[in-house]
Image (tube, rainbow, N blue to C red):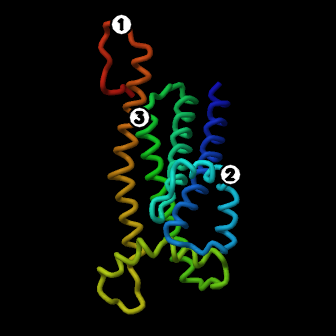
Amino acid sequence: MPYFANAGSILVHVIFGIAAWIFALRVLLQWVGANFNNPICQALYKLTNPVLMPLRRVLKPWKRIDLAGALATFLILCLKVWLLLALSGISAGLRATIVLGFAETIAMLLTMYLVFILVRSILSWIGPSPRHPAVPLLIQLTEPVLRPIRSLLPNLGGLDLSPMIAMVAILLAQALVVAPLMDWGTLLARTDAAAQFAIPGQSIPTQPSF
């Protein structure tokens, strides 16, 4: 029944989306060298350690990049897209799942930074309490993106255009990088599905029909 499939899709989006955000955020916070004693960091570590600590025995961190966390994020999103396609009646192959999982990973990271930069810009207008644990984390997460842009802009006094430029760049990346990857992965998934039901000796179309 389509109603149960739609309900299942909502649950998959929510559950796997939240899980991927949690693991990705831990990877990003470790990358920027966030304070381990920050209560938000502590909560993330407690949530992710049961998965990452065993995985780190095989996949060690590289410099400040938590490869185990990155792999966990990617695998979660691969499983998400596979389940969503299965709920739509499409049995995706390995290559389609990998491509779509990679596209989902990039899309999620771009969305995360779009949210981070937007929230930081709003907080700069309302003047939040510097003691809030989220404030230093937002600054640490967004500075690696905003600082290079800021260094290329002329000095405009108190006007900082780097957040706006960064958000436009993120939107362009979503349109020019993520969208083609999604289309390619969807084409692979439909081709794999068509191959399962193809009659022997009959050619398989390379373009899906909509």
Label at residue 50:
2
The relative height of residue 126 versus residue 99 in the rendered view (above or below) is below
| Label 2 SS | helix
User: Which of labels 1 and 3 is toward the front?
Assistant: 1
Amino acid type, callout 1? Pro
Of residue 57 and residue 39, the one placed in the foreground of this image is: 57
Number of marks present in the image shown: 3
**In x, y percent, where is residue 26?**
58, 61
**Which residue is depicted at the point 55% across and 77% down?**
122
Residues under labels 2 and 3: Cα distance? 33 Å
Label at residue 183:
none
**Which residue is depicted at the point 52% across and 38% down?**
81
Amino acid type, callout 2? Pro
**In x, y percent, where is residue 79?**
55, 38
Label at residue 200:
1
For the N terminus, the quadrant is: top right
Residues under labels 1 and 3: Cα distance? 23 Å
